[in-house]
Amino acid sequence: MFGPGVLEVRAEGAALARVVTPVNQTVGFPLPDLAVNQVLDSTTSLPGAPERWIRMPGPRAGQYRLLMHGNEDGPYRVAVKLEHEGRDLFNLDWSATARRNEQLIADLTVDATGNVPTGAYLDALRPLAGPAPGNFIYP
């Protein structure tokens, strides 16, 4: 049985998104043709889809990391949503312009009472300094 609520990230355009959980597990797209999913019961769209999405049911309280990677130069759009029983607890959409190979990071804090999410907060994107969080091996 998984906890309540769903954390969802949608991205389209020139940037790829991935989420790193508080326990350093990764879900998302480190490369255009690769999806990583280390979180039980999480799902992603297919790599290369026009709109790529990540769905993580039962998000626990804590600090997640949202990473954005410029796949190419150009515009992109991102939507981050936390919901519980069909009600939005957090919803933020934005558009920006990516630069090829630019890596950005933002802290996403999920609040909860017990195991039930109550809200979230996303810090501003900033340039990634040092290696990206999350452990995974890819070809």
Image (tube, grey):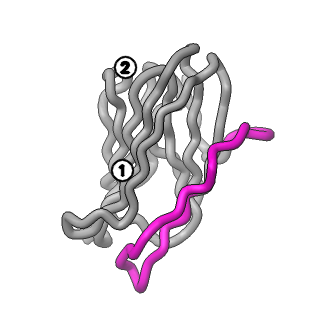
Q: Where is residue 130 in the image (x, y as percent from the top left)?
A: 79, 39
The magenta stretch is 108-132
Q: Earlier in the sequence, mark 1 or mark 2?
A: 1
Which residue is labeled 2 in the image? 48
Q: Which of 72 and 135 is in front in this view?
A: 72
Q: Position of residue 118 (x, y in %)?
A: 39, 75
Residue at x-position 40% and y-position 65% = 59
Is the residue 59 above or below the residue 96 in the image?
below
Mark 1 closeness class: few <14, some 14–19, many ≥20 residues within 10 Å: many
Taken as a whole, is the magenta stretch helix, strand or loop? strand
**Marks 1 and 2 in Cβ contact (< 8 Å):** no
Q: Nearer the viewer, residue 27 or 69?
A: 69
Is the residue 138 above or below the residue 126 in the image?
above
Residue 76 lies in the magenta-colored region? no
Which residue is labeled 1 in the image? 8
| Quarter of the image with the N terminus in it | bottom left
Q: Is mark 1 on a helix, strand or loop?
A: strand
Mark 2 closeness class: few <14, some 14–19, many ≥20 residues within 10 Å: some
Q: Where is residue 90 in the image (x, y as percent from the top left)?
A: 39, 61
Q: Of the residues shown, which amino acid type is indicated by label 2?
A: Gly
Q: Position of residue 62 (x, y in %)?
A: 55, 69
Residue at x-position 30% and y-position 63% = 88
Is the residue 129 above or below the residue 35 in the image?
below
- How far, Cα to Cα, is label 1 from label 2? 18 Å
Residue 31 in view of the camera? yes
Task: Check the image and name the residue furthest to the right.
Answer: 130
Residue 36 in view of the camera? no
| Quarter of the image with the C terminus in it | top right
Residue at x-position 38% and y-position 73% = 117
Q: Which of 70 and 20 is in front in this view?
A: 70
- Circle count: 2
Is the residue 85 above or below the residue 30 in the image?
below
